[in-house]
Amino acid sequence: MPVSLLTAEQVRVAERSTGELLANGTLMRRASHGVAQVVVGRLAATGGCYGRTVGIVVGAGDNGGDALFAGAELARRGIRVTAVLLAPDKAHPKALLAFGSAGGRLGTELPRGLDVVIDGVVGIGGRGPLRPTAAKVFAGVAPSTVVVAVDLPSGVDADTGVVHDPAVRADITVTFGVRRRAHLLAGPQCGRIVVVDIGLPADHEGDPDVAEEYAPGEIRLQALTDADIAAAWPVPGAHDDKYTQGVVGVIAGSHRYPGAAILSTGAAVAATSGMVRYVGSAHAEVVAHRPEVVVVPELSEAGRVQAWVIGPGAGTDDAALERLRTVLATDLPVLVDADALTVLAAHPDLVIGRDAPTLLTPHAGEFARLTGEPVGADRLAAVADLAKRWGATVLLKGRITLVAQADGTVYGNDAGSSWAATAGAGDVLSGIAGSLLAAGLPPIWAGAAAARVHAHAARNAASGAPIGASDLLAALRPTIRELLAP
Ligand SMILES: NC(=O)C1=CN([C@@H]2O[C@H](COP(=O)(O)OP(=O)(O)OC[C@H]3O[C@@H](n4cnc5c(N)ncnc54)[C@H](O)[C@@H]3O)[C@@H](O)[C@H]2O)[C@@H](O)CC1
Ligand SMILES: Nc1ncnc2c1ncn2[C@@H]1O[C@H](COP(=O)(O)OP(=O)(O)O)[C@@H](O)[C@H]1O
Ligand SMILES: [K+]
């Protein structure tokens, strides 16, 4: 099942629902034990615990309490632990006492050359950037020191994932019970995320039971897992033929710029085993690369399809507008990308009010063209708002891809690497998502599944070195094979 990512308020609701466990400090003891275990695991893997050095940066709230209790546990294991209290008179009293009794020391700055530093400045109660005193402490941390954030890297907004300046950059983030939105939205800032079970009540899907907290239209952020995608990926059955699996039509590229057409149709051929049609002036080039694609130069000559992809390298002239108008007037699912988004920006009425499934796939620049303003720091709010206003599904590209449906549901994916940031990678994405639309997946699933497989393919193709979009395309089939038969 998709993994939910909660707001700070939803986390607090889930914590409060445990009643006594929250009030008597059991949740905090479980949380801090989880932090200590992660640190011990890290030290044990690199030479053991005894005599190693850990620093703790402690803020005024419960996040600092978690860090101090964890520090007490580490000190009891023979680790030399030093805590810097940013607000000494507000540090969690019981945790501070436990830390002192366990042999933890207090300092005004962190010792040099630490093995690990624990960021307990702020968690879900944090607002804005690291304040100057905390920033100064972290500025002195050596690059070789492993940074373990308690709950969230401080300076990262829990709900929007906005990374303020300055903010902590963590190698590992240890969180409690359920992921916060920032763990996806600011994934690269969090490093590896470890979710510790602290006994929050779970609903039948395994998520903390906050379903009733969602009002209609409210943003609900989730992430698809590989298992979700594998279960939904179209696999031909005994009675399938080329038509029953869905035919995708791609309107892309031009004789002068055939690359987008080759990449998009190539990805559509690789993603599912149905049929791919191509419409446009790059028909000779497309068929030279992929003889199985059925090509025609004009839209009027195209046979039946179950979904359209329109836009990659397809131009922005009057003829492009007419083709866009024609496909959007059908009752078929349509993916609008690249040049077609530029055309659409001047004619939003073509999509607003459209009943059939519509998937828009802008990068940040195209998004700004559609809305008339930059995406801004809060990408989640921006993409959800456009989806709601236009009544379409919107996939905002980038390291973190967000796919928003008009009802407030948003699926997010952290690509895990940025090797896909290369020319033509978007054309590949359009072909994958288009073929999934033709197979009958709802736009949010087609977009999110395509984004995740695209990211895996980029990582597999790159394997530590730069790639071009055709390398990404070539890695698609082995990546899908790995997904379907892990
Ligand atoms: N409520 C609970 O039972 C549990 C809470 N837990 C921990 O408690 C945290 C939440 O604790 P709190 O609600 O006390 O909030 P935090 O400790 O996250 O932060 C609030 C405090 O930090 C100050 N502050 C806010 N922004 C700041 C900034 N930019 N720089 C410096 N100080 C800033 C605030 O004035 C306030 O004193 C979670 O993130 C988690 O680590 C865990 O122990 C799990 C259980
Ligand atoms: N920093 C990044 N990390 C990971 N993936 C990225 C990054 N930037 C872009 N991408 C992905 O690469 C693709 C680029 O698409 P796009 O910008 O349309 O390029 P083009 O038009 O050249 O094909 C998208 O799938 C996008 O999500
Ligand atoms: K923190």
Image: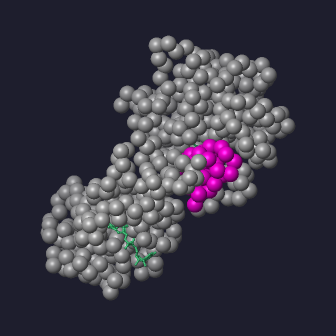
Q: Which residues are magenta?
A: 378-406
How far from the left and from the top, in percent, is residue 282? 73, 26
Is residue 282 shown left or right of residue 441? right
Q: Residue at x 45, y 64 (%)?
A: 9
Q: Is residue 404 above or below residue 315?
A: below
Q: Farthest residue to the bottom: give it.
A: 89
Q: Residue at x 17, y 59 (%)?
A: 48
Q: Is residue 480 above or below residue 400?
A: above
How far from the left and from the top, in percent, is residue 405? 59, 45
Q: Residue at x 57, y 24 (%)?
A: 269
- Residue 49 occupies quadrant: bottom left
Is residue 31 shown left or right of residue 277? left
* Frontmost residue, 165 versus 63: 63
Q: Quadrant of ligand 3?
A: bottom left
Q: Farthest residue to the right: give it.
A: 318
Question: Would residue 194 be seen by someone viewing this image from the given angle?
Answer: no
* Frontmost residue, 334 versus 458: 334
Residue 273 in the magenta stretch? The answer is no
Q: Residue at x 49, y 62 (%)?
A: 159
Is residue 252 shown left or right of residue 13? right
Residue 405 in the magenta stretch? The answer is yes
Q: Colour mode?
A: one colour
Where, quadrant-wise, is the N terminus in this rendering?
Answer: top left
